[in-house]
Image (spheres, rainbow, N blue to C red):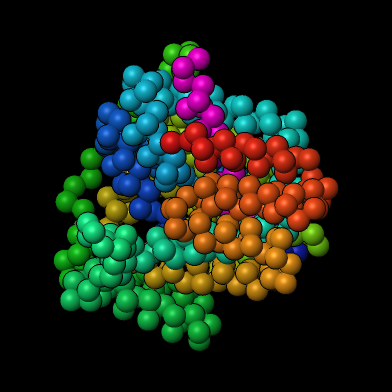
């Protein structure tokens, strides 16, 4: 146990094995939905469902362990929501097969890895203004709170001719369970009860089982890995697929920067300038993970903002990520059990984590309009466009534009101009 404490610097970061384990459980429970959500989406591209469940767990497990040992940072990884939809509904049809689409994912991860090793990806993060980085974290907080509200059924799609979103009804069991879980979890959190998020999820799951919203697994079939190593990398080397490769890279490149910034801010693992202290190894592992996801046939594996649930429980080291990885690896055989936890049970944790992350907004200097307005645009467009990358795009483009229009064109670093141009092209020509 002493060697574990020394390797992960538990004492130096004010934590212990029990706290890291509790945080890991909270993170895993808020991420467990990916075991079924990812295969359900990739099924539209022709990826077999049952093998996708096992390979989603395998990929997440491997990459979380890599993050823990390689970066010693409390960040968990799994197949990215949003990225998997791009693969299923855009890339695979254009590429002709899901195997070729996964080949593009492998290439994307390798190209981004080169950008990390040459310092380009890290340099990009260095030149982003602090208020914009804070707005990214707060915007992601709103984003995951919004996801929680949608998963709970509290927010529902609007009807044709009406507002884009509307409200659910507590007469439905799903929203009622979520609200009950939110009340219980908030009460526990306010009383500083250890493991409040985990207890809330378990209580909500128990109620969901009693109400028939969740069901215990009927059988345990042996796992299949037939989709692993089917990625057609050579077939993906086509000029006509280059724009799609750029789209995959753009989303993955900036989503991870935003996620790492948010987790770094919340965990206190940043320097005096607000920079994540372990950003280089984090980005290396994240880039390698994208290719691992493609090789295993489950789309790009990326860093998950749900890691904030574990950080909220006190996790501060890579031991958290290693333990999350072991939980994912065990779920290869126990995936039906992980699937018992319904979205309504994890929704309260997501909402409360969003609440914690929005506090970063209080540090934004709103008296400086030339940075505050772009920060606000970042904050509001991340949840409303349902895309971290799009929210960052509007913030970055507006930041450079406002600086130029106010006669302060020298303020932004030259790299910011390049980033703004790329984001502008992404907004105009991206799908």
Q: Left or right: 341 with respect to 280?
A: left
Tell me what residue is drawn at x 68 percent, y 31 percent: 115
Q: Where is residue 211, by image quadrant? A: bottom left
Please identify the quadrant where the C terminus is shown.
top left
Rendering coords of residue 266 (x, y %): 63, 65
Q: Left or right: 321 with respect to 225?
A: right
**Image height check: is 143 above or below 413?**
below
**Image height check: is 138 above or below 73?**
below
Tell me what residue is drawn at x 72 percent, y 43 percent: 416
| Residue 257 highlighted magenta (yes or no) | yes
Q: Left or right: 41 with respect to 391?
A: left
Q: Is residue 257 visible?
A: no
Rendering coords of residue 377 (x, y %): 57, 59
Q: How many marks?
A: 0
| Residue 211 highlighted magenta (yes or no) | no
Main SS category, magenta section: helix
Q: Left or right: 410 with respect to 105?
A: right
**Image height check: is 368 above or below 238?**
below
Q: Is residue 49 visible?
A: yes
**Image height check: is 331 above or below 211?**
above
Tell me what residue is drawn at x 44 percent, y 80 percent: 186
Please identify the quadrant where the N terminus is shown.
bottom right
Q: Where is residue 426, by image quadrant? A: top right
Tell me what residue is drawn at x 32 percent, y 60 percent: 164
Rendering coords of residue 353 (x, y %): 50, 68
Q: Which of the pair 22/27 is nearer the observer?
A: 27
Q: Which residue sits furthest bottom?
A: 191
Q: Which residues are magenta?
A: 239-262
Q: Which residue sits furthest right?
A: 410
């Amino acid at each position: 146990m002493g060697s574990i404490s020394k390797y992960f610097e538990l004492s130096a970061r004010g934590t212990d094995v029990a706290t890291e384990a509790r945080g890991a459980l909270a993170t895993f429970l808020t991420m467990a939905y990916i075991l079924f959500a990812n295969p359900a989406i990739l099924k539209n591209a022709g990826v077999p469902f049952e093998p996708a469940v096992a390979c989603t767990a395998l990929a997440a497990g491997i990459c979380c362990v890599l993050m823990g040992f390689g970066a010693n940072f409390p960040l968990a990884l799994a197949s990215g929501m949003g990225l998997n939809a791009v693969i299923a509904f855009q890339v695979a049809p254009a590429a002709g097969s899901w195997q070729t689409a996964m080949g593009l994912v492998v290439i994307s991860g390798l190209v981004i890895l080169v950008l990390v090793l040459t310092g380009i990806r890290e340099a990009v993060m260095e030149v982003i203004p602090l208020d914009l980085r804070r707005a990214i974290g707060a915007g992601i907080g709103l984003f995951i709170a919004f996801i929680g509200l949608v998963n709970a059924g509290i927010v529902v799609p609007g009807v044709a001719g009406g507002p884009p979103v509307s409200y659910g009804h507590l007469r439905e069991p799903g929203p009622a369970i979520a609200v009950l879980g939110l009340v219980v979890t908030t009460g526990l959190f306010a009383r500083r009860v250890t493991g409040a998020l985990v207890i809330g999820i378990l209580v909500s799951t128990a109620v969901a089982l009693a109400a028939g919203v969740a069901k215990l697994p009927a059988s345990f079939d042996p796992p299949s890995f037939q989709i692993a190593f089917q990625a057609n990398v050579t077939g993906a080397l086509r000029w006509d697929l280059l724009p799609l490769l750029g789209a995959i890279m753009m989303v993955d490149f900036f989503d991870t920067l935003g996620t790492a910034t948010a987790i770094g801010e919340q965990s206190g693992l940043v320097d005096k300038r607000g920079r994540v202290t372990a950003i280089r190894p984090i980005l290396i592992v994240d880039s390698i993970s994208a290719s691992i996801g493609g090789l295993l046939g489950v789309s790009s594996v990326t860093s998950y903002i749900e890691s904030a649930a574990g950080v909220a429980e006190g996790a501060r080291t890579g031991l958290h990520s290693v333990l999350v990885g072991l939980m994912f690896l065990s779920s290869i055989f126990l995936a039906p059990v992980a699937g018992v936890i319904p979205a309504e049970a994890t929704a309260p944790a997501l909402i409360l984590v969003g609440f914690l992350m929005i506090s970063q907004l209080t540090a934004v200097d709103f008296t400086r309009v030339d940075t505050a307005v772009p920060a606000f645009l970042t904050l509001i467009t991340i949840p409303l466009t349902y895309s971290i990358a799009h929210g960052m795009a509007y913030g970055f483009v507006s930041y450079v534009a406002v600086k130029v229009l106010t006669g302060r064109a020298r303020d932004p670093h030259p790299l910011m101009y390049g980033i703004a141009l790329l984001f502008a092209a992404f907004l105009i020509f991206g799908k």
